[in-house]
Image: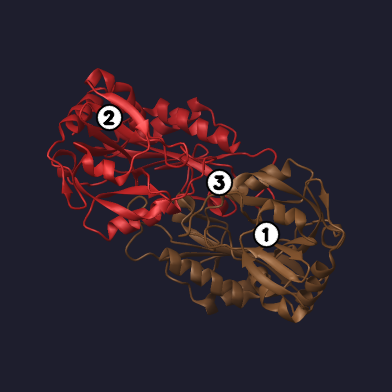
Chain colours: A brown, B red
Amino acid sequence: MILIDGRPGTSIPVMDRGLQYGDGVFETTAVINGRPLCLDAHLRRLASGCRALRIPVPDARTLTTESAQVAADQSRAVLKIIVTRGAGGRGYQPPPDPVPTRIVSIHPWPDYPEAYRTAGIDALFCRCTLALQPALAGIKHLNRLEQVLARDEIGRSDCAEGFVADGTGAIIEGSMSNVFLRQGRLLLTPDLKDCGVAGIVRAEILQRAGSLGLEARVRRIMSTDVLAADEVFFTNSIIGIWPVRRAGDHTYAAADFAHRVAQALAVAGYIAPA
Amino acid sequence: MILIDGRPGTSIPVMDRGLQYGDGVFETTAVINGRPLCLDAHLRRLASGCRALRIPVPDARTLTTESAQVAADQSRAVLKIIVTRGAGGRGYQPPPDPVPTRIVSIHPWPDYPEAYRTAGIDALFCRCTLALQPALAGIKHLNRLEQVLARDEIGRSDCAEGFVADGTGAIIEGSMSNVFLRQGRLLLTPDLKDCGVAGIVRAEILQRAGSLGLEARVRRIMSTDVLAADEVFFTNSIIGIWPVRRAGDHTYAAADFAHRVAQALAVAGYIAPA
């Protein structure tokens, strides 16, 4: 089911700036038993992205109502919310009073093997890189060609996810996820000030690290750090947590913290239960 | 008029990857007396962009026919061709056998003041920058948020166009155009290997520089070079050539070459006549 500005629909005008320029933002989250997980946090990030792009922020209650409407009677599904700047303007130049387009849609739950969450995955070091763009960093915007290229590269490998670095070699994220390293009692995740998407699950893990016995640090991370870590895992709102079993030629013996934090987040309703 | 996959239409499916991810490429060119200018060159760049993104290249004859269809009976208009990867795939991951969407549309000729081509324009040094992304450099793809941000900045100034630099301070292009500097008998334009769109008019000017008495060089250009130049001008397929009258506090006395190359290109049918 798709709601476009609150009405059932399947298509949008060609002139919408979401298509013309990728001029918009989006969110995806898991729906379990009719309820979108962490919807408030996703709507806060959506609003923050809109403000950064000077797109009027849609009313959160409206988006909540529309999300509940498409999520009703879904036992397990994916909710996607897109907000574009709507139509109008003069070429790239935004219209002075944009009327955003809201697209709230529901999608089948992806059929990733259960083993990805338990035994873990093999991960690639992607050749393609992320550009440094502080003005767009952290925002889940609709300009996602870099992720398409990265995902295409991973899809042609035997790996389920990959590490994507910026042009300087610093690991930033997975192609569709954030990345964490545990090194002893330190929990590390890349700094996203220059590129990358600041995930809702990432924020929650950073928040909970202390109570789970680790000290969290956001910093520059290189591939050598990944290979030297005790455990490594990818996170997002749909996959939950995927421990890494192998990266390049390196295998990881441990996934204890990944499993522990996954259970804590599932119990708290932040990610889908197994 | 809009043709979507050859049929008149006004909307595209929400699930089209052009909207979901900006997963596609586009071209715009001037239509004069029913004829799109330099269409073959635009279709070659479109094909080159598709190949870089691994999108199947639409048949050039089909796009030519559809362009002629929407351009017929237009004395002066803008033709836009969008090709997306179509719908499908698994999240960011492209489908194995994508069926591209073709959108061929006609738009009103923009009402820029005639003085922009004759007396020239005032130009801004934009604060926003372009990210370095060699994998996407030169391609006219649908991820255009950087241009939206730049154009938004220019729209809130009293300038008609602006110089956009990369993160290292090198001037790359205008917000919707390429940029040239003339310094004595040298014609300079920025290197686009790391970012920027390689314009059709830019290529033609580089080609013709010699016969117009200048030596063309593609190289790194800084704002100090812009301020030290004898003349500066912006180019694209719609605006043609806009000489710069003022950049920052600096005014330019000359626009001779800009006017000369504009006339040559108009006579040769590469840009719209005055």
- Residue A34 or residue A138, whichever sits in front: A138
Are labels 2 and 3 assigned to the same chain? Answer: yes
Q: In the image, what residue type sits under mark 1? A: Ser
The answer, for residue A180, to whether it is visible in the render is yes
Give the residue type at disc 3: Asp
Q: CA distance from mark 3 to mark 1?
A: 19 Å
Q: CA distance from mark 2 to mark 3?
A: 35 Å
Name the residue that disc number 1 marks. Answer: A177
Judge from the rendering whether residue B125 lies leftward or rightward of residue B70; answer left or right: left
Q: Residues within 10 Å of mark 1 (few under 14, many from 20)?
A: many
- Mark 2: few/some/many CA within 10 Å (<14, 14-19, 20+): many
Image-quadrant location for residue A220? bottom right
In the rendered image, residue B186, in percent from the top left (x then y), is placed at: 26, 28
> Mark 3 near mark 1, Cβ–Cβ under 8 Å?
no
Of circles 2 and 1, which is in front?
Answer: 2
Q: Quadrant of the N terminus of chain A?
A: bottom right
* Chain-order first, disc 2 or disc 3: 3
Are discs 2 and 1 less than 8 Å apart at CB?
no
Q: Which residue is tagged 3?
A: B23
Residues indicated by labels 2 and 1 sit on the same polypeptide chain: no
Label 3 sits on a secondary structure element that is: loop
Residue at 64% from the left image edge and 51% from the top image edge:
A164
Residue A231 - label: none
- Type of amino acid at the residue the image marks with label 2: Leu
Which residue is denoted by mark 2 in the rendering?
B187
What residue is drawn where x is 56% and y is 47%?
Answer: A167
Q: Chain of mark 3?
A: B
**Quick one: SS at disc 1?**
loop
Q: Is residue B75 visible?
A: no
